[in-house]
Amino acid sequence: MGIIMSGKEIANEIKEEIKSYVNTTKKTLNKSPKIVSILVGNDGGSIYYQNFQQRLAEQLNIDFEKIILNETILEEDLISLIKKLNFDKNIDGIILLLPLPKHINEKIITNIISVEKDIDCLSEASVGRFYKGEKSFLPCTPNSVITLLKAYKVPLEGANVVIVGRSNIVGKPLFQMFLNENSTVTICHSKTKNLKKITQTADILVLAIGKPKFIDGEYIKEGAVIIDVGTSNVNGKITGDVDFEDVIEKAAMVTPVPGGVGALTTTLLFKNACEGLK
């Protein structure tokens, strides 16, 4: 029986670090980190996430401002707003909730966000810095994977890592982060041949494809560490890419869904805002 890797426990530890940092900042600088979260329209998932952000900010004593804009807002007005936030010295982090309404060019808008305040690493400038190894905020979901592995003392240097999924949000940046840890990394996708043969070589197997319970015990080798980033809604329940009950008997460690990687992402997003103050 493998170990269940709790993202919630690690998140709670990081929350305590953030609270300590905020308390120190209040005493020394007479201010708290401030985050502004922008929602355009009424996407249900974005509304839920923004409210969750607000609750977490309250727990951490971080100043938090919700900006909710009508979905008919003109692109140039949204650009003006973000530029204004960029120049506001009291704001340490800007979050832009996606997706945006169809009449707004997402690429143009994300690239308006200042690199110094782009805590979600959305702009091309932020992404470019990240891939070049320059100082930048780390993408939160890939960073959650690495943070979780390190917390459980999983050796990364020299490890054979297989990532299934090549998205710009998870697969590609995670590939780079594992390289930075001196892992040997293979990335697989929908056109990969002999997928099972490749995943069976992994010391660490990361799934990020959005196919519920796609990976079972036959896809992994004995003693592998399995990181499930997938989230799908199955009969009203959030379900990962891994058949957890089948894999847990064979793997050394497995992340649950929910309660694994996802439990860390927003906490690390807020940690980015704190580091932006330095």
Image: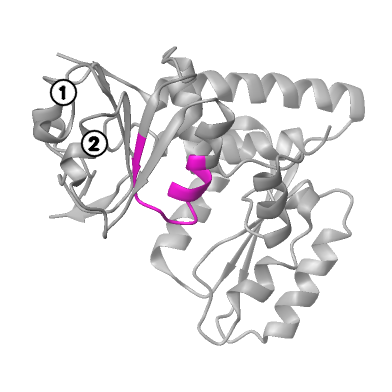
Front-most of 88 and 169?
A: 169
The location of residue 151, given as percent across then percent down, is: 47, 16
Determine the secondary structure under disc 2.
helix
Q: Quadrant of residue 207?
A: top left
- The quarter of the image holding the C terminus is top right
Determine the secondary structure under disc 1.
loop
Amino acid carrying mark 2 in the image:
Thr
Front-most of 200 and 125?
A: 200
The residue identified by callout 2 is: 199
- Check contact, mark 1 vs mark 2: CB within 8 A: no
- The quarter of the image holding the N terminus is top left
Residue at 57%, 23% in the rendered image: 14
In the depicted structure, whether residue 107 falls above or below residue 217: below
User: Mark 1 and mark 2: span between their CA atoms?
Assistant: 16 Å
Q: Residues within 10 Å of mark 1 (few under 14, many from 20)?
A: many
The location of residue 153, given as percent across then percent down, is: 44, 12
Please report whichever mark, 1 or 2, sits nearer to the chain's N-terminal start.
2
Disc number placed over residue 206 in the picture, else none: none
Q: Is residue 172 magenta?
A: yes
Q: Which residues are magenta?
A: 162-175
In the depicted structure, whether residue 261 falls above or below residue 191: above
Front-most of 9 and 202?
A: 202
Q: Is residue 171 magenta?
A: yes
User: Does residue 170 appear in the picture of this structure?
Assistant: no
The residue identified by callout 1 is: 248
Residue at 24%, 16% in the rendered image: 252
Q: Residues within 10 Å of mark 2 (few under 14, many from 20)?
A: many
Amino acid carrying mark 1 in the image:
Ile
Front-most of 105 and 8?
A: 105
Residue at 49%, 56% in the rendered image: 168
Question: Quick check: 40 left or right of 77?
Answer: left
